[in-house]
Amino acid sequence: MSPRWYFDFVSPFSYVHWQKIRPLAEAGRVDAVPIVFGAVLHAHGIRGPAEIPKKREFIYRQALWQAAREGVPLAFPPAHPFNPLAALRLCVAAGSTPQAITTIFDAIWREGRSGDDAVAAAAPGLGIDDPASALADPGVKERLRANTDAALAAGVFGVPTLAVDGELFWGNDSHALMLAVLEDPGLLREGPMAAAATLPVGIERRR
């Protein structure tokens, strides 16, 4: 199986990282897979980062800083987090192509539109004249569920995540490591990196 890049449009880090992953997707080296991040959080019993006030403040600033450092225009939508389900289904209905992913990401994070406004703006350019019908298509819903189930089966806990040969690489800031492993999958199979995977879990008890 090709390396899979799991993402959700609700994530600003997915948008920033997509700028670097897109050439790999266009070259067929990586499959971009839209998933429901909220379902992943629920499955792991994790609170969303935007649900913790100080973490929310930090990640928004971090996303803006990373985007500025990488020369990526970023404008937050009117409210965040928003419900990304319509955007995700539109992506699936459009074939989850690099063009579809870019068009939807740009409508949300480059133009600062809400999720629903982004769908209305993006659909015509993706050849979808009746978005409501496309989003309600049972096949589209099932494909998105299957994508999310596959992510959970792979152990995905956050977005964006690149899955390579059973290993997971999470976050825009781990891109350099992702590239290194794509070029040399054996990198993780020897030395300290191999040993890190078998390090026992230790719990310190304080009296």
Image (cartoon, rainbow, N blue to C red):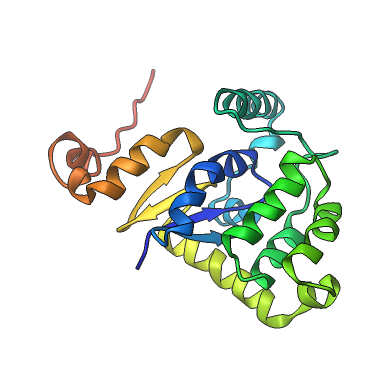
Q: Position of residue 122 (x, y in %)?
A: 78, 58
Q: Position of residue 150 (x, y in %)?
A: 48, 67
Q: Position of residue 115 (x, y in %)?
A: 80, 52
* On screen, residue 101 above or below 135: above
Query: Could one spot residue 144 in this view of the protein?
Result: yes
Question: In terms of depth relative to the viewer, which is nearer, 21 or 189?
Answer: 21
Residue at (57, 27) in percent of width and height: 66
| Number of on-image labels | 0
Q: Is residue 112 left or right of residue 162?
A: right
Residue at (62, 24) in percent of width and height: 68
Quarter residue 178 falls in: top left
Question: In terms of depth relative to the viewer, which is nearer, 120 or 89?
Answer: 120
Question: In terms of depth relative to the viewer, which is nearer, 173 or 45?
Answer: 173
Residue at (61, 22) in percent of width and height: 65
Q: Is residue 76 left or right of residue 182?
A: right
Residue sitting at the far left: 191
Q: Position of residue 95 (x, y in %)?
A: 61, 71
Residue at (52, 46) in percent of width and height: 160
Question: In terms of depth relative to the viewer, which is nearer, 88 or 103?
Answer: 103
Residue sitting at the far bottom: 138
Q: Is residue 203 left or right of residue 65?
A: left
Query: Could one spot residue 36 in this view of the protein?
Result: no
Quarter residue 190 falls in: top left
Can you say which quadrant of the picture contains the C terminus? top left
Can you say which quadrant of the picture contains the N terminus? bottom left
